[in-house]
Amino acid sequence: MSVPLIERLDGARVVVCAGPGGVGKTTTAAALGLALAGRGLRVAVVTIDPARRLADALGLGALGNEPERVSADALAALGVAPPGELWASMLDPQRTFDGLIAAVSPDDAARDRVLANPLYRQISSAAGGSHEFTAVARLHDLVADPRFDVVVLDTPPSRNALDFLDAPDRIAGFLEGRAMQALLGQGKGGFAARLARRGTGLALTALQRLTGVDLLRDLSTFFEALGPLTDGLSARAVAVRALLRDPATRFVVVASPEPVPAAEAVFFRRHLDGAAMPFTGLVVNRAEVVAAGEHDRDGAAVADALAADLGEDLAARVGRTWDEHRARAAHDRTVVAALARATGDDRPVVVPLLPGEVFDLPALAAVRDGLVADAPAG
C-alpha cells in the first residue's frame, strides 16, 4: 500500500467509506468523489446518513433518492473539467423499497398488491432492518446505472455499517430459508394462507373487533403477493453480496485520533478481513499537525520572536498555546502510526483538523486537496 490512496482507487467501481460516527465520513466520501471527478470520472456519492452533511458539503440545497448533479460551473471553479461529473443522493428507504418491489414484480397487478398491503407499509417504513435492506438495493441500482463510472457510498457509523455489510447475506439467507419458504408455501398453500383459511383465534378475533384490523387477512395477502417476488429480491441480495467482495470494490476506513474512534476503526478493519471484503486504505481526519520545519521550535522560541510586537505577557501565552498544540500533534502522530500498523496501511492519509465545519464546495476542495496531497496530478 505504498502508493497514494487516490491511486489505489484506480479502476474502482464502488468506494465504501466506513468507520465510527463523528469522524467526518460524509465529508471524506464527498471529497473522494470530488477527487475522482477531477480524474475524469462520473461519480455518484450516496449517503445513508439522513443528516444534511452531504448536501451542505456539496453546496446543494437538498438531496433526495435520485442523484442530483453538481453544476459544471461549480466544479470548474474547483479544477474539475469534463468528462468528470459529480452527483449526489441521500437514501430514501421508503422510495427505494417501493422501487425495488416495482422492479422485481412480474406485472403491475403484483406490484400494486404488495404496495397496497398494510403489512408491507409497516415493514418498509420501519427504521430497523429495512434501512440496510434498502441500502443494498440502492447500491445495486446505482452501480448498474450507466451514468456513473464509480459510486462512493457513505455508510452509517461502524456498528450500523456492519449491519449494512452483512445485510446481503442475511437477506439472501432469510428469503431462501425454510421459515420464509414455509410462510410462502406454494401459492395459497403457504402457512399464512392456511392459517387465514382456518379462521382466527379468539384473541385475534377480539383484536380485530377492537382495532378493525384483519391481521390474518393482511398477513395472508402479503405473503401470497410476496411469493413471486422473492426470487428477484434474493437475486439482488446475492448480486450485492458478490459486489461487496469484488476486486473493483474498495473499502476506505475513516477514523480520527480519539481513542474510541481509533479502536472502532481497527475493529472494523478486522471485520472486513473476516468478511473477505477488500480493505483499500485508512484516512485519519481531524488530526492536529505541525507544519514541516516547525517541530523543533518550542514555545519559548515563539514567545521570544513575538515579544517585541505583542508584549512579554501575551507572547508568553502564545508560546504556551504553541507548546500545547505541539503536544497534541505529537499524540496524534503516535495514534496515526499505531493505526497504520493495526490496519496494515503504511501510507494512511492524514487530514488536518480544520478551523470549522465543511459547509460548501471550497471547503470541501480543501479536504480533497489534503486527501490527494501526496499523489501526482491525475
Image: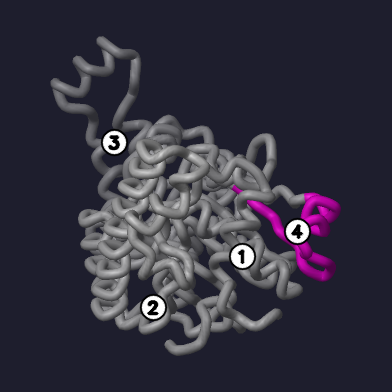
Q: Nearer the viewer, residue 54 or 324?
A: 324
Q: Residue 299: where, in percent of width, then height?
A: 34, 55
**Disc 3 from disc 2: Cα separation:** 49 Å
Q: Which residue is mark 1?
A: 369
Label 1 crowd (10 A; few <14 / some 14-19 / many >=20)? some
Q: Label for residue 279?
A: 2
Q: Which residue is mark 3?
A: 196
Q: Is there a contact, CB below 8 Å, between mark 1 and mark 3?
A: no
On screen, residue 7 versus residue 25, left or right, reads right
Q: Earlier in the sequence, mark 3 or mark 4?
A: 4
**Disc 2 from disc 1: Cα separation:** 22 Å
**Residue type pointed to by label 2:** Phe
Q: Is there a contact, CB below 8 Å, between mark 1 and mark 4?
A: no
**Disc 3 from disc 4: Cα separation:** 62 Å
Which stretch did the figure color magenta? 71-89
Judge depth for marks 1 and 3 and give the one in front: 1
